[in-house]
Image (cartoon, grey):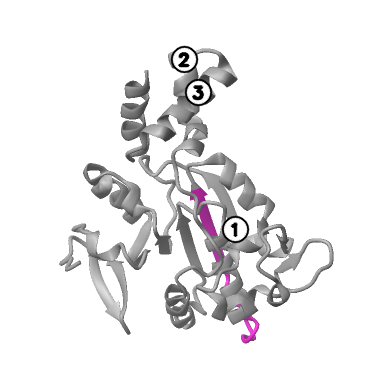
Amino acid sequence: MIDFLGRLVEERFGIKAEPDDVEKLYSYILNTYGSTDPGIIDKLFLSGEAADFLTVNETYFFREPVHFSFLRELLPSFERTGIRICSAAVASGCEAYSIAMLIESYNRSLEKPIPYFIDAFDINPRVIETARKGIYSSRTLREDGSCYHYMADPYLKKLGNGHPVRSAVPNSAIRYQVEPSLKKNIRFFVHNLMNELPPGGYDIVFFRNAFIYFLQRYREHILSNLISVLKEGGILIMGVSETAGVSHAAIDARNRNDIFYFQKCASGGNNTA
């Protein structure tokens, strides 16, 4: 059964699970359902519940700030049209909220704010529920990205006393609540990247620090699903350490001020990454 579950993880999720993680999943199935009936296992994989034992959910606000600087540079070109963004493999939501904070900060300088919408998804329903609640520990505020923490001040309030983010001390017991108004333009949902995405017409897709967990034989398939919902000329942003491993005929590698990203072509492409 353990071997069967391991193969199922690869086929359904496209990742290689650690044996200990598969053992934990197996124990959970037995302890919770008292059976390894195929119908029960199928339900756990279809719902994404099984992913809770298998995926890495590392996330924090303004992670890899170079990408937020890049987004800030791009925003003027969307002042007339508005912008649609997808945050793929979003874990508990920090990336999506960081994007919204940055756009809201930029909009405060405009007479007519940029309309924006963010779709954010993950395969794990537990972390998506955390994202919807918007309650986080101080561990989601790291030195990496600290130059942008001032943007979080209006939107992250310390539970219990309302002090802003910059007064935080490194204590994981401290929790913050996302201001409900920040959620108005964000939709969180559960989705498996092995499956096609709903039509999106996104200007930008963030897919960072998750690609490395997918097995090589599924990577082109994963990229195809993401690229399919990008507008022509749309931008795909990958993790800083991942760009060298990205190759797909439908996107071209770009470099802007030492920031590497990918752009969807009209047809085919000359990928150089």
> Residue 27: which numbered mark, if any?
3
- Is 219 or 80 nearer to us in this picture? 219
Q: Quadrant location of the N terminus?
A: top left
Q: Residues within 10 Å of mark 1 (few under 14, many from 20)?
A: many
Q: How many marks?
A: 3
Q: Residues within 10 Å of mark 3 (few under 14, many from 20)?
A: few
- Is 92 or 186 nearer to us in this picture? 92
- Amino acid bearing label 3: Ser
Question: 242 left or right of 136?
Answer: left
Q: Quadrant location of the C terminus?
A: bottom left
Between disc 3 and disc 1, the foreground one is: 3
Q: What residue is shown with label 2?
A: 36
In x, y percent, where is residue 55?
44, 43
* Residue at the (46%, 59%) spot, across then down: 86
* Residue at the (75%, 67%) spot, across then down: 157
Between disc 1 and disc 2, the foreground one is: 2
> Residue 186: which numbered mark, if any?
1
* Residue 89 higher or lower than 252, as above or below: above
> Which label's residue is closer to the chain start, 2 or 3?
3
Magenta stretch bounds: 107-121
- Amino acid bearing label 2: Thr
3D distance between C-alphas at marks 3 and 1: 35 Å
Quadrant for residue 258, please give it.
bottom left
Residue 228 visible in the snapshot: no
> Residue 25: which numbered mark, if any?
none
